[in-house]
Image (tube, coloured by chain):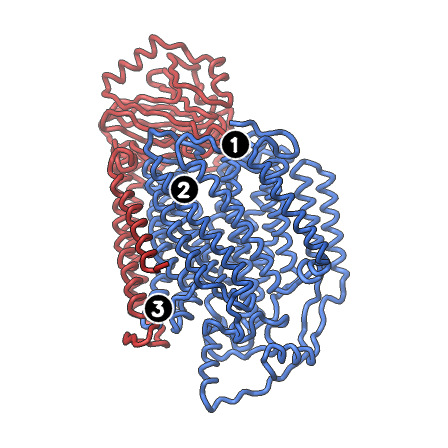
Chain colours: A red, B blue
Amino acid sequence: MNKRRVAWYWKILLLTTVSSLFLSGCDRQYLVFNPAGPVAQKEYDLIVLSAVLCAIVVIPVLALLFFILYRYRDRPGNKAKYSPNWHDSKILEVVWWGIPIIIIGILSIYTAKTTYTLTKPPVKDVKPITIQVTSMDWKWLFQYPGQKIATVNYAEIPVGVPVQFHLTSNQMMNSFWVPELGGQEYTMPGMAMRLWLQADRPGTYYGSGANFTGKGFTHMKFKVIAKPQAEFDQWARQIKQTEKPLTMTVYKQLAKKGLAEKQAFSSYPAQLFTNTLNENGGKYMDKDMKHGKSDMPAMNHNDHDMSGMEHKGE
Amino acid sequence: MGEKSKGFFVTGDPLIYGADVAIIVTLLGIIIFLTVFKKWGWLWKEWFTTVDHKRIGIMYLVSSLLMLFRGGVDALLMRLQLAAPNTHFLTSQHYNEIFTTHGTIMILFMAMPFMFALFNIVIPLQIGARDVAYPFLNALSFWLFFFGALLFNLSFVVGGSPDAGWLSYPPLSEIAGSPGPGQNFYIWGIQISGIGSLATGINFLVTILKMRAPGMKLMKMPLFSWSVLSSCITIIFAFPVLTVTLALLFVDRYLGAHIFTADSGNPMMYVNLIWMWGHPEVYIVVLPAFGIYSEIVSTFSKKKIFGYKSMVFSMMIISILGYFTWVHHFFTMGAGADVNTFFAITTMAIGIPTGVKIFNWLFTMFRGRITISQPMLWTIAFIPCFVVGGATGVMLAIAPADYQYHNSYFLIAHFHQTLIGGVVFGYLAGLYYWWPKMFGFKLNERLGKWAFWTWNIGFYVCFMPQYALGFMGMTRRVYTYGWDMGWAPFNMVSTVGAFLMGIGFIFQAWQILYSIKNGEKDVTGDPWNGRTLEWSIPSPAPLYNFAVIPEVKHDDDWWETKKAMADSQYKKEPPQYEPIHMPKQSGIPFIMSACWFVVGFGFTFGWSYVGLAGLLGVGLCLLARSFQQETDYYIPVDEVRKTEASLGRVG
């Protein structure tokens, strides 16, 4: 077969693939590129910054590669310089040790800054709310200590209010991820991790478990619905009035392995979240911490502020 | 979601029945072939009991290519399942098993043995040695790997495959999450082959430090040997961590301890430990690939490697820094801002020496004379692929941004780009480069080009869309998805790419078979106009490698010798042959590893007596070996002279 023609076909195929990548982009389907709150926004900014800085290195390297391949091919009559023993140049070495060091230096500063920023509430002047999240096999339980209600596989939050999610698991280790609101954090048995998120515009946001937990893992999806404060209060009131309570019996049923539908409950057993932590090893963590044996980011009391990402931020 | 069967044999899936039949037919075919052609004795004498590094290397190579096939079929099954939304080709259970075995096999039973194949085939020849430091241990390493891999693969037909992911995080991998024997297969398969890997690390470290030809100072050593040295150092520190971690997991599962369960124990400990091995592991496999690229770039540019000292320095930095980055695999576990910042910066920092190596390769080609042969093709393809993969690696290292990438397809695309673009391309380049040295003929160029282009185009078509899928919120390890998220088109494209890579592999199999019959013979022993010692001896190398151990005076010593030989003043001194000291064959490595297999098999099914019987066998083998007195012999001068004459190298 004609070699040039084959190469041409490949080129067309490659071009269509690449362009379809870009053309279909930039719409709402790219969740990470559509930050709906300050946390996701900060992460998005870092993603863009790092991509640009990397491109500053990548593009010249690729250009250089193609230039060298073109210029120094071993073909008769190639007049390009050939220096078979030239193998050392202090200046060049300094350049290519130096440039990456500078770029990594810049990235490091931004990384450190954002890492510490994200351990604090996104806005200071609004009173945050807390939602306790328990990942189970294979569904999500959300408890609202402020409103004393609970939901399964969906959560509603007020717009413009920082939300502190307290994350734990009653079985396998999962990860709580709502890309449009911000990055994920693991849910682990016996520990309560903290994650600040906030929505700045109303909407329904896709959430999922990101860490593999076995057979039903794929189906561990949930929605986070952001509404103005008044509508959120209205929603909570309505649940309080119309839904059934989450009793221990219902909870035990829910905790069994299997999938679950969206549900809402007008109340939940007192200390359910703390008990879940304790039953899964939280009590051992607590003891270790009291004796100063461990600096684990584990906590079993909701009102302590030493856990995980925030112990530096307070 | 089909329930896993409880019986000894895996039942209920037509795919597995098909595979059962294929396995039985193949086994019968092999047995009949060996019996009809009376090859059993040959197999035992020439291969099973050999301690020759070249043969051990070939056995590693064959095993790793078989495992590449199995891991590749796993990958294609996954891509078929994900090609379109709501597919019912595989159940959730089956999909979970397949991604677990795909990952485990590709890293531990494909990349590692492929790497050891190249260690074995090349290192003694490159440093001017007649074998490795511990030939018996070398054979034992291979057979431990072989039986470990066999045990792991057996889970496919008996007992059921592991299904908790390739690193098997607890609590999912504990009894409560994975009650069947599948997880035990994982533990024992890796454990047994892991002992072999550790022993190989020690073996080659000692070989390189103690057995170099006279005159070959460390700073005159070829870069591939340097890369193996740095990889071995990493193996020695990393593999014991793996062994201990898996042993503790086994104690949890077998004796009901709670080391990694959340009540009283802690799963985070496992995650830390496994990555303390797991991260260095990726450097273990990629460093030798860097060495291969260095050899090839220099040979096919007809130019000295640029910045040799810088290359050595950067490899050593990588192998040390590789121990201080493990937390970047779980920034989202919330170790705190201090810890995350530290590990983010160390991770980005490791990009610096890696970047330097890229520039050095480029400037080796700069002002050279570049021949684009098959090894060079893969090397050239590696550079853009690894540069982009490295860049996405730096992006992933930024802890806060990683909260958005973690466990998504962005991550999947990244590590496949570095592991395929870096490691697999490197090993394939090495395979094409040293193939004539192993077998005495070259691999067909035309079929090789077809393989190269389908592999490469397939790679980009398969993995570039996965970066986009990550940004669209697709997480890894989902066995199906709906139409609602817009993931369908990219997944379809990705599947097409995966199959292109599969076609590339078929081209390679065809290329090897075709070249066995029609390959261009390498009569010179130096088909590429090479620069290092392995090219100074005939292809394939005789049993004793070097009839006379060379005296090394230069870096790129063979290149300099050839230059001197071209001079009309050059006088070749007649070689002074001496009797050659060689190790004797032994069946003990094979038998001892088979006993380890029995140990693994017994404990996998909880049959403690079988396991203990196996351990007894291991003990007896150790005892038998320690009473062996005559483990070596001498090849007489006459025989050496005869062999050299028959190879056209008359003394």
Local packing at callout 1 (Cα closer than 10 Å; few below 14, some 14-19, many 20+) is some
Tag 2's secondary structure? helix
Q: Position of residue B560 (x, y in %)?
A: 45, 80
Tag 1's secondary structure? helix
Q: Quadrant of the N terminus of chain A?
A: bottom left
Q: Which mark is residue B365?
A: 3
Tell me the subunit letter for badge 1.
Answer: B
Q: Earlier in the sequence, mark 2 or mark 1?
A: 1
Q: Which mark is residue B495?
A: 2
Q: Do the residues indicated by labels 2 and 1 lie within the same chain of the protein? A: yes
Q: Is residue B86 above or below residue B419?
A: above
Mark 3 to mark 1 CA distance (whole Å): 50 Å
Residue depicted at x 34% and y 8%: A242
Which residue is at the front of the view, B438 or B169?
B438
Residue type at numbered disc 2: Thr
Residue B542 lies in quadrant: bottom right
Which residue is at the front of the view, B405 or B37?
B37
Q: Which mark is residue B93?
A: 1
Residue depicted at x 24% and y 24%: A202
Q: Position of residue B307 (x, y in %)?
A: 37, 69
Residue A84 lies in quadrant: bottom left
Q: Earlier in the sequence, mark 2 or mark 3?
A: 3
Q: Do the residues indicated by labels 3 and 1 lie within the same chain of the protein? A: yes
Residue depicted at x 33% and y 68%: B363
